[in-house]
Image (spheres, rainbow, N blue to C red):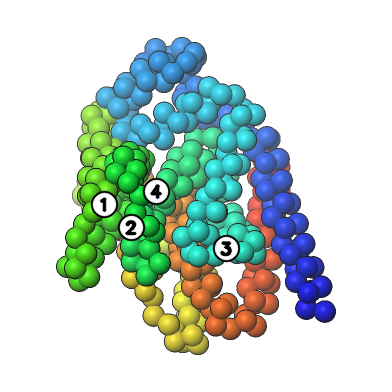
Amino acid sequence: MEKNRRAFTGCVVWAGIILLYLAAFRLHLNTPFMMDDIWYGTNLATGQPLQGLMDVLQGQFWHFMNWGGRCVTHAILQLTILSGELAADLMNLTMTVLLSLVVCKMADARRPEWFLTCSVMIFACNANMRMSMFWQAGVVNYVYSTVWILLFLGQYLDLLRENGRKESRGRSLWMPVLGLMTGWSNENMGPAVMVAAAGITLYLWKQKHQRPKCWMIEGIVGSFLGSLLVILAPGNFSRASTIESSGLGEVLYRQFQSMLTATASYLFPVLAITLVVWFVYRVYCRERLDASQLSLVIVAVLAHGAMAISPHYPDRATFGIMVVCVLLTLSMLVKIRRKFSKTGVWIGLTALALWLRSIYLMFEISLSF
């Protein structure tokens, strides 16, 4: 009887995963290149349609000097546009699946039901699914970049766990590149993760008496340089000079309002779920957040706080923060489930509700085209 029940549950879970991602791929196919995609489909320096890699490189140099420093994500965006809509749709779906896989790996959630739970949380708790996961510029800037940002952060979080990852000689070769990509991706997640990596390294050195390894320093330096390139790009100042200045009072009010909106509206669904799970985790499981989970809290707070100095806080900019909260929530759920097996029913019902919401939101987006 128990064997049949598990088989049935497994079939339901896999059906949910397949239907969810089929719906997502269908929506990708229905979403054309639009808005900023049209501009990034050209050599930004000349305005002519992209013909090859040299156009991308020339355009990104112009972008860095005249528009903004987010060159890694925008170069990849241009390459996806250059590949055509179908190829871009396939890459987008692959990166979305990979994002959930990375989150599950970091949360030590290795079963298909956890993958489904993670996926529906990312879809359903999204402040603007259309602009962060289906618009081509959005999916590259947020989904793609969050994958390599989490891969970078995961190298340091593993060191906080007893079952830390075995050392690899090749890590010193690719860690500076991954760090540079992490810092050079966006203005809030990159610097937040860099600070967390530096904090973990310092903690291990001073509290655990573990001397920093070469790759750890290389990753921090790479992400720091990448963050500088994003923030101090000449294009940022060139573009800022064209924006009409406002009084200090107006600026402070606008910033307060945007931060309040982001917290109480954009991030509310994931924060509500995270807080409920934390309450169960703390009160009923009598567990405290471990060092790796506290690091995730710090990353989310820093990334959110960094947007206070941004002139605009669009809803899609909360995507990376939302995924970090999903990772934190999933890591707690895994431990709750191991301690109290009967919670599986409640987790399953919640996942079902989020699955239905995800499908509904995708259907609603499809009607807008």
Mark 3, Cα crowd under 10 Å, few <14 / some 14-19 / many 20+, is: few
- From this viewpoint, is residue 277 visible? no
Q: CA separation, marks 4 and 3? A: 20 Å
Return the residue nearer the eye: 62 or 35: 62
- Where does label 3 land, which residue? 110
Q: Are marks 2 and 1 in contact (CB under 8 Å)?
A: yes
Answer with the quarter of the image where residue 29 lies: top right
Mark nearer the N terminus (1 vs 3): 3
Q: Amino acid at mark 3?
A: Arg
- Number of numbered labels in the structure image: 4
Identify the residue position indicated by label 2 in the image.
156
Q: Which mark is residue 149?
A: 4
- Lower position in the chain sequence, tag 4 or tag 3: 3
- Give the labeled residue for mark 1: 216
Three-letter code for the amino acid on which mark 2 is drawn: Tyr
Per the image, label 3 sits on a secondary structure element best described as loop
Label 2 to label 4: alpha-carbon separation: 12 Å
